[in-house]
């Protein structure tokens, strides 16, 4: 079993829909990251969080440390949000990221 | 700042050849990471450095892979000899622990070994 599991693996939605991507982990962490990778490959850090909730524009990330679970929400989704979203965790006591397998999101106009 | 810089962006080589990938981290960052991304295995950490010192190389697949960081502004990942199964996208990332550990990724090097 992977240390970081994401769901769903693939998600297709219509423009304007509210999107939720989930991430569960099984190890002790110091922080959790949400990354975005567009076709063509570049990886961008969206959020790094260790508790509570963070918001940036239409994106919201939450984390529940007790349940070892995080969610990434996109409100009013747009085709330009189409990308792979990757959850990664900072292993506690080690300066290294462990990655989920990614969620491929497609937003149709 | 220009961000993390990687070169080359694309590399095509033949099996058995030596390949060297290069990375320039963001100035002032004290951590540098090398990752590999494949369709089958996703993103994997190969090795990371702190203040130019290798800290964890447990992700390096085998002795054919080596990484160096001779100074704070330059790192290399070398594969010798290369094999077709090394074909992947290799990312370099850097972070600043004092400023919170967010990792900044380079654009990646797409390696194809024929």
Image: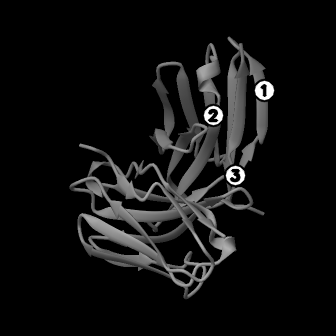
Circle 1 Cα neighbour tier, 10 Å, few/some/many (<14 / 14–19 / ≥20): few
Chain letter of disc 3 in the image: A
- Same subunit, tags 1 and 3: yes
Q: Disc 3 or 2, which lies upstream in sequence? A: 2
- Specify the label residue A12 is tagged with: 1
The residue singled out by tag 2 in the image is A83
Q: Quadrant of residue A83?
A: top right
Q: Disc 1 or 3, which lies upstream in sequence? A: 1
**Mark toward the viewer: 3 or 2:** 2
- Same subunit, tags 2 and 1: yes
- Counting from the top left corner in percent of width and height, residue B3 is at 32, 46
Rounded to the nearest angstrom, the CA distance separating label 1 from label 3 is 17 Å
Q: Is residue B23 depicted above or below A80 in this figure? A: below
Q: Quadrant of residue A64?
A: top right
Image-based side of A80 in relation to B85, left or right: left
Circle 2 Cα neighbour tier, 10 Å, few/some/many (<14 / 14–19 / ≥20): some
Rounded to the nearest angstrom, the CA distance separating label 3 from label 2 is 13 Å
- Counting from the top left corner in percent of width and height, residue A77 is at 64, 17
Q: Give the residue displayed 40% in from the left and 77% down from the top.
A: B55
Q: Secondary structure at mark 3?
A: loop
Image-based side of B46 in relation to A79, left or right: left
- Same subunit, tags 3 and 2: yes
Quadrant housing the C terminus of chain A: top right
Rounded to the nearest angstrom, the CA distance separating label 2 from label 1 is 11 Å
Pick out the residue farthest to the bottom.
B63
Q: Disc 2 or 1, which lies upstream in sequence? A: 1
């Amino acid at each position: 079993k992977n240390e970081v599991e994401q769901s769903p693996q693939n998600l297709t939605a219509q423009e304007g829909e509210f999107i939720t991507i989930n991430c569960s982990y099984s190890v002790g962490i110091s922080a959790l990251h949400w990354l975005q990778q567009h076709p063509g490959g570049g990886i961008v850090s969206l959020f790094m969080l260790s508790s509570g909730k963070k918001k940036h524009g239409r994106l919201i990330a939450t984390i529940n440390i007790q349940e070892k679970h995080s969610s990434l929400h996109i409100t009013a989704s747009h085709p330009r949000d189409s990308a792979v979203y990757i959850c990664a965790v900072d292993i506690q006591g080690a300066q290294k990221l462990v990655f989920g397998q990614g969620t491929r999101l497609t937003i149709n106009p | 700042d220009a961000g993390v810089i990687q070169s080359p962006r694309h590399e095509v080589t033949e099996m058995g050849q030596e390949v060297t990938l290069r990375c320039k981290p963001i100035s002032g960052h004290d951590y540098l990471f090398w990752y590999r991304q494949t369709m089958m295995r996703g993103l994997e950490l190969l090795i990371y450095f702190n203040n130019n010192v290798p800290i964890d190389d447990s992700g390096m697949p085998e002795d054919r892979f080596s990484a160096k960081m001779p100074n704070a502004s330059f790192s290399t990942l070398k594969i010798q000899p290369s094999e077709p199964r090394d074909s992947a996208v290799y990312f370099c990332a850097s972070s600043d622990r004092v400023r919170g550990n967010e990792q900044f990724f380079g654009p990646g090097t797409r390696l194809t070994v024929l």
